[in-house]
């Protein structure tokens, strides 16, 4: 699977994928409770999403880096290094060259002006902070980090206790540093050209983010979809969806929006180029990598 950077243009914005890591070993039957292998017969190209044995799916964990109007903006920040994640070996104590990959496209941490977070799950907030002399400090010292209110509320509730360590090492230090901005549950505009769209279901505060420049649109989906299989089967929720009905409603909204806007769709976990377009096909939807 490819971890090389990929760059796209949307209007005046330059958008580059920078990979943190790849998650291997997930079976389709685990990922999707409604899994039906008949989809692979209907859409043979989707077989390429599976490993050589046809048994496992790989998910990419990456950041979208936007260079626009003299500013650098990040969408989500991956898993991070040195983070204790006893609930999953896939996330525990990683050592990835993420910052070196940023440097390879000319981006240093101090260059980042804004970090826009679709939600506050472990694999989307990890590089918010890094370990410096035993302390978790914001990785991007000059950035404003925009966080959904709904996920902050979740961490403050008893239900959030099981993932409290994620908040403690990757969210709380940003708030303590005075670098956080809270996005309300209704979403809304941020900067010129960005808009947060409420897409709950995967989690309570989940947002998808659109960018519009010179009449062109990019759509950062977060975890509304995890693989292209859900483009063809939007009724399939992943095992990670907290509210099943809301997740399906948000997915349908997102696919309709992507078609209506002819958006460049930039998911958080697709492999291959990680980017593509959604079209209508046979009363449903289809996906094409670009």
Image (spheres, rainbow, N blue to C red):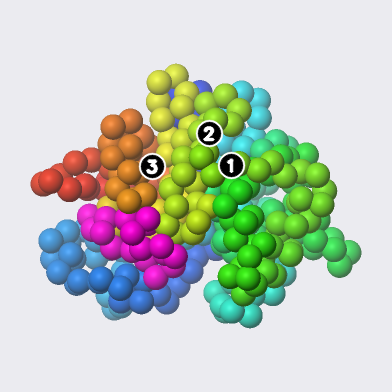
Judging by the rendered image, the residue that carries numbered circle 1 is: 184
Query: Quick one: SS at disc 2?
Result: strand
Over which residues does the magenta segment extend? Answer: 232-248
- Name which residue lies at 41% across and 62% down: 243
Q: What is the x, y in percent for residue 62?
A: 53, 54
Q: Residue 188 carries which label?
A: 2
Q: Residue 265 carries which label?
A: 3
Q: In this view, does 90 lie above or below 211?
A: below
Q: Nearer the viewer, residue 193 or 198?
A: 198
Mark closer to the chain start, 3 or 1: 1
Q: Is residue 94 above or below residue 269?
A: below
C-alpha gap between disc 3 and disc 2: 19 Å
Q: Can residue 271 be seen in this view?
A: no
Label 2 Cα neighbours within 10 Å, binned few <14 / some 14-19 / many ≥20: few
Query: Does 125 lie within the magenta span?
Result: no
Q: Is residue 200 visible?
A: yes
- Mark 1 near mark 2, Cβ–Cβ under 8 Å? yes
């Amino acid at each position: 699977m490819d971890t090389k950077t990929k760059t796209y243009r949307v209007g005046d914005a330059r958008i580059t994928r920078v990979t943190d890591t790849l998650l291997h070993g997930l079976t389709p039957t685990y990922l999707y409770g409604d899994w039906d292998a008949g989809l692979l017969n209907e859409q043979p190209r989707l077989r390429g999403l599976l490993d050589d044995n046809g048994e496992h799916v790989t998910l990419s964990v990456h950041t979208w880096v936007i260079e626009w109007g003299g500013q650098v903006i990040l969408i989500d920040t991956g898993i991070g290094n040195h983070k204790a994640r006893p609930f999953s070996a896939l996330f525990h104590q990683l050592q990835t060259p993420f910052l070196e990959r940023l440097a390879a496209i000319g981006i240093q941490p101090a260059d980042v002006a804004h970090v826009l977070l679709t939600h506050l799950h472990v694999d989307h907030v990890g590089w918010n902070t890094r370990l410096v002399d035993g302390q978790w400090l914001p990785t991007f010292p000059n950035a404003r980090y925009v966080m959904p209110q709904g996920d902050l509320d979740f961490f403050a509730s008893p239900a959030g206790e099981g993932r409290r360590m994620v908040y403690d090492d990757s969210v709380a230090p940003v708030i303590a540093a005075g670098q956080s901005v809270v996005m309300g549950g209704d979403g809304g505009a941020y900067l010129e050209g960005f808009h947060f769209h409420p897409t709950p279901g995967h989690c309570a505060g989940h947002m998808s983010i659109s960018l519009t420049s010179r009449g062109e649109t990019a759509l950062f989906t977060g975890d509304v979809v995890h693989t292209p299989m859900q483009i063809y089967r939007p009724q399939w929720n992943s095992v990670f969806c907290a509210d099943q009905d809301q997740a399906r409603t948000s997915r349908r909204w997102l696919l309709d929006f992507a078609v209506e806007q002819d958006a460049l769709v930039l998911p958080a976990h697709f492999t291959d180029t990680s980017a593509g377009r959604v079209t209508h096909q046979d009363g449903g939807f289809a996906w094409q990598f670009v």
